[in-house]
Amino acid sequence: MLSIIVAVAKNNVIGKDNKLIWHLPEDLKRFKQLTTGHTIIMGRKTFESLGRVLPNRKHIVLCNDANLNIEDENVEVIDNIQLLDNYINSEEENFIIGGATIYKLLMPYANKMYITKINEEFEGDVYFPQIDSNVWQEVERQKGIKDEKNPFNYEYITYIRK
Ligand SMILES: NC(=O)c1ccc[n+]([C@@H]2O[C@H](COP(=O)([O-])OP(=O)(O)OC[C@H]3O[C@@H](n4cnc5c(N)ncnc54)[C@H](OP(=O)(O)O)[C@@H]3O)[C@@H](O)[C@H]2O)c1
């Protein structure tokens, strides 16, 4: 199965200039907890934005150039979403980690979404798609820790496909 994981501002912004805008270490900790040991699927721009291969996770990078060569045994480059069929149909949870293009492309195939909703507006250039309440049901909502290092009001919201 595919699950989406994303941090979204109140105005649906998720990034700017191929970077994350906010720094929320508590959310990064949660991202690590949820995705470690799993496959993470991302667009080529998000892979570049990470700047490194994340430990203990298989990376699948979508890119139109099948010849893109990333020399790392934990990274696979694919140029066709049909190659994700095994991940969509598997019992295991595989995570779609962005960015905007890939969320939009793969949202129809996802069964679960872990959304960190930041209760503030940010200026950005990439957005998360609208969440259709006919399709998605909220099953959990939890306030995030706000402190000196995490200076925003934010919530962790989980949705499953109806
Ligand atoms: N807030 C969050 O949780 C979060 C999470 C992740 C990312 N982000 C942000 O999102 C932004 C990046 O998003 P983005 O939309 O610009 O880029 P992206 O989705 O990360 O990557 C887009 C790239 O994926 C490849 N691609 C897209 N569709 C494809 C297809 N059907 N087949 C094969 N390859 C395909 C293309 O690569 P080629 O051009 O190489 O062909 C395309 O340029 C950054 O600002 C990042 O910080 C935010």
Image (spheres, grey):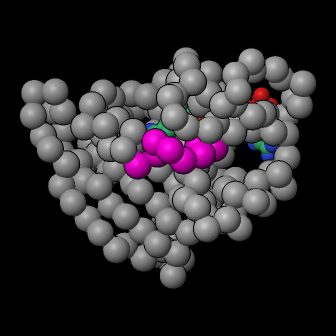
Q: Residue at x 49, y 24 (%)?
A: 19
Q: From the viewer's perspective, is 61 left or right of 34?
A: right
Q: Is residue 29 left or right of residue 126?
A: left
In the rendered image, residue 130, in percent from the top left (x then y), is placed at 51, 60
* Residue 42 in view of the camera: no
Between 129 and 60, the residue placed more toward the observer is 60
Q: Is residue 87 above or below residue 151?
A: below
Up-down relation of residue 54 to residue 10 (above or below): above
Q: How many marks?
A: 0
Q: State whether residue 9 is above or below residue 84.
A: above
Residue 110: x, y in percent? 60, 64
Quadrant (top left, top right, bottom left, bottom right) of the N terminus: bottom right
Ligand 1 visible in quadrant: top right
Q: Residue at point 70% right, 27% down?
A: 73
Tell me which residue sits at (43%, 28%) in the image. 20
Quarter residue 100 falls in = top right
Q: Is residue 156 left or right of residue 151?
A: right
Residue 32 image offset from top left, x and y in percent: 39, 39
Q: Residue furthest left?
A: 147
Image quadrant of residue 41? top right
User: In which quarter of the view is residue 13 placed?
Assistant: top left
Q: Is residue 35 magenta?
A: yes
Q: Is residue 73 visible?
A: yes
Q: Residue at x 83, y 51 (%)?
A: 83
Residue 131 part of the magenta-drawn span: no
Q: Is residue 5 left or right of residue 150?
A: right
Along the viewing direction, whichever of 69 and 64 lies nearer the viewer: 69
Q: Nearer the viewer, residue 56 or 120?
A: 56
The span picked out in magenta is 34-42
